[in-house]
Amino acid sequence: MRKLLVTTVALTLLAGAAAAEPPALDARIDALARTWDHVNYEVQGPAKVNQLAAIAAQADALAKQYPGRAEPLIWVGIALSTEAGAKGGMGALGLAKEARASLERAEKINPNALNGSVYTSLGSLYYQVPGFPVAFGDKAKARAYLTKALAANPKGVDPNYFYGDFLFKEGQYADAERVLQTALAAPARPGREVADRGRHAEAAALLARVRAKRG
């Protein structure tokens, strides 16, 4: 009986720890997101690259601490891909490959985590990096991932913005205009005000370019 009681107590404690784990992780993921928002939209110059690298390192530490969760891996991918964009040049390709690897690991764990952000991030990588033989860019894969992103989060500002950007680059201006209008009408994300302002500004600027092309 005593052994059974001890086992029951241990299981209760483990269950309590497991129940406490997601909120603790969620709070840390939210903090990472807000830090990325600030760095991506409000920091310029070499400091931006360094701070994005720091975010990637923090997300990687969380991924090691919570190996069964996709969210930290998604943020590793987002931070690395943003760092690649800020850094530019051939040195960015290695970062882009690391970002893709992290996002693919997240996809295997839970592709629907963070409202399907893994699809948005992979899709944006596939159309923004060069294709073979320089890198892994692939327009067909980009379209497939971005379509999945919209299915997972049809009203989200990020999937609509990136799909709109992809369609613009493909010369599909009517579709790009429609998608970007959805991006501009996206609901606000509590705690992500900096990102919302920045992404809406990008979407508005891109929409103006689309309309100029359409005449």
Image (tube, helix red, strand yellow):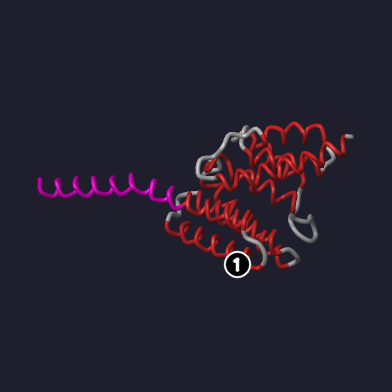
Q: Main secondary structure of the magenta part?
A: helix
In the rendered image, which quarter is residue 119 located in? top right
Quarter that holds the N terminus: top left
Q: Can you give x and y, in whole percent of width and height, for residue 60 in the image?
A: 51, 60
The residue sitting at 47% across, 49% down in the picture is: 69
- Looking at the image, is 171 positioned above or below residue 95? above
Front in this rendered view, residue 39 or 148: 39
- Amino acid on which the number 1 mark rests in the picture: Asn
Q: Which residues are magenta?
A: 1-28
Q: Can you give x and y, in whole percent of width and height, for residue 15 in the image?
A: 29, 45
Q: Can you give x and y, in whole percent of width and height, for residue 41 in the image?
A: 63, 54
Count of picture labels: 1
Q: In the image, 112: left or right of 144?
A: left
In the rendered image, which quarter is residue 129 located in? bottom right
Neighbor class of circle 1 (other Cα within 10 Å; few <14, some 14-19, many 20+) is some
Quarter that holds the C terminus: top right
In the rendered image, which quarter is residue 155 located in? top right
The residue sitting at 60% across, 47% down in the picture is: 195
The secondary structure type at the circle numbered 1 is: helix
- Looking at the image, is 17 positioned above or below residue 43? above
- Looking at the image, is 142 positioned above or below residue 85? above
Q: Can you give x and y, in whole percent of width and height, for residue 146 in the image?
A: 68, 40
Q: Is residue 19 magenta?
A: yes
The residue sitting at 79% across, 55% down in the picture is: 131
Front in this rendered view, residue 51 or 115: 51
Q: Is residue 6 magenta?
A: yes
The residue sitting at 68% across, 61% down in the picture is: 84
> Residue placed farthest to the right in the image?
215
**Which residue in the protein does label 1 denote?**
50
